[in-house]
Image (cartoon, rainbow, N blue to C red):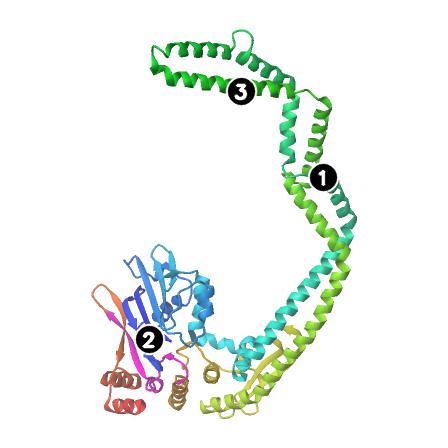
Amino acid sequence: MLQCLTIENYALIEHLEFSPTRGLTVITGETGAGKSIIMGALGLILGQRADAKTVRTQATKCVIEASFDISNYQLEEFFASNELEYDASNIIVRREIYATGKSRAFVNDTPVQLSLLKQLGEALIDIHSQHQNLLIGKESFQQEVLDALAGNSTIAEQYQSDYKKLSTLRKKLHEAKEMALKNAQEADYIRYQFEQLDEANLEPGELEELEEEQEMLSHAEDIKSSMYEMSELLNGEENSILSALKSVNKTAESLLRVYPSLQEITERIESDYIDLKDIAEDISSQAEDISFDPKRLEFVEDRISTLCNLLKKHGCSSVEELISLRDDLADRIIHIDNSDEEIFELEKELKIQEKNIAKSAKALSDSRKNSAGMLEKKLIEKVSYLGMPNVRFEVQIKPLDDYTAHGSDEILFLFSANKNQSLKPCGEVASGGEISRLMLSIKSLVASAKTLPTIIFDEIDTGVSGDIADRMGVVMKEMSDHLQVITITHLPQVAGKGAAHFMVYKEDSENDTTTHINQLVGEERVKEIARMLSGSTITQEALANAKTLMK
């Protein structure tokens, strides 16, 4: 349930707090006072898109925050799967809209995407306006209503599990047949490509190694000549670096007796001599190993050419990609060779699953048929009570040729409000006032059958008056025994039924206009209902009538 709604700097609202009761809360106020502004702010909490124009003039941002008690909503899994902090008794949803056009949303101070906020919002509040009456013509809504009264959630879950498996198998079989057909048309070419790559004996990193070797073989004579030259400079017979360093070392050693401070330098010279001698030997050894091999160079160049041609042919940038392509082709050949067996196994699985879903679809359909009469009877009673004594209502259930995500039935609500009028689909024949009463009756029945979120009726009672308005108030009051109901109304008969009553009003100052909301109690409430009855001039008769309505 909605515990508290706080709005700051939104349109005509500077600051507003609204804390509805657990039962039936009524909101009244003159036309233009700002009731629609409050609904617009609440819509932002439920994930509607924001408009920077709604930020109050001269404010940098507006903030709408709502706290909810969701103890009975079974939303633990939703919060866990979206990594949101869960405290069932106090969930806080906040929306910030900046004058720059930027918008942010939070659930328990965790930033969330608008799509996630919308998904959560649908589980928290059901705003029912005259526009939502169009739902009654949709088959999906009619199916949801019938299932709610049938209480067939366990059967529906089993059916949906079977349907998911069926859909997956159908998709796999379709893809397997498509792939088998495609592979059959390309089988020879696939085998040719694979054999060409397989015969190439590809190795990871091979091209880079060959290119290095090619560089070396192409310059073998120059490399060997330069290395001999390096070796001669280091350790040649005449004027070599090593012989000079050896002489330096001997001189340093001879001075040690008279100048001991040269000890460290002498040791470093000796160490350098040993290192350079090792380097000279390594250079000489490597130079001996280098030889110009025309046959090896020819082989390397041919191999590089082969790899480059394969890369170009297959549009690859590395030997590793060629290896991956080779392995993919090998897999495709396996599928080609085993496609008939794979298709046979999938067809066998599909037949078993078709038997399973036929059972669960029948169970779901039977539950709906068994509950259709009850829905017809109860709805006729409710709608008749709301001033349509000649109403007729029928739930039509027809089998479909195939399975859908919600069963194998086509569900259609047929309606007639008058005598001698044939039954027709609800959305086609009912007037606005009739649809409002029909939808209120439907929501009332669903509320008594399953846990619903907070429901807000936004002037659903427009177009009715007198005794019918009073009865609509009774129905809303009965609904509030099962869930939190908030209704925005212009009807005193409905306002009198509320467990809590709030009034929205505008206040003008010299430079500004602001919207406020106050909870009315005692005589304040009596006067507001009297105003709704008689207008701006409140009579004693209206006051007495208001007290009667509140009883």
Closer to the N terminus: mark 3 or mark 2? 2
Q: CA distance from mark 3 to mark 1?
A: 38 Å
Is residue 106 visible in this depiction of the protein?
A: yes
Q: Secondary structure at mark 3?
A: helix
Density class for disc 3 (Cα within 10 Å; few <14, some 14-19, many ≥20) is some
Asked if the magenta segment contains residue 498, the reply would be yes
Residue lying at the far right of the rendered structure: 188
Density class for disc 2 (Cα within 10 Å; few <14, some 14-19, many ≥20) is few
Q: Nearer the viewer, mark 3 or mark 2?
A: 3
Q: Nearer the viewer, mark 3 or mark 1?
A: 3
Q: Which residue is mark 3?
A: 279
Q: Which residue is mark 2?
A: 31
Q: Which residue is mark 1?
A: 201
- Residue type at numbered disc 3: Ile
Closer to the N terminus: mark 3 or mark 1? 1
* Span colored in magenta: 481-507
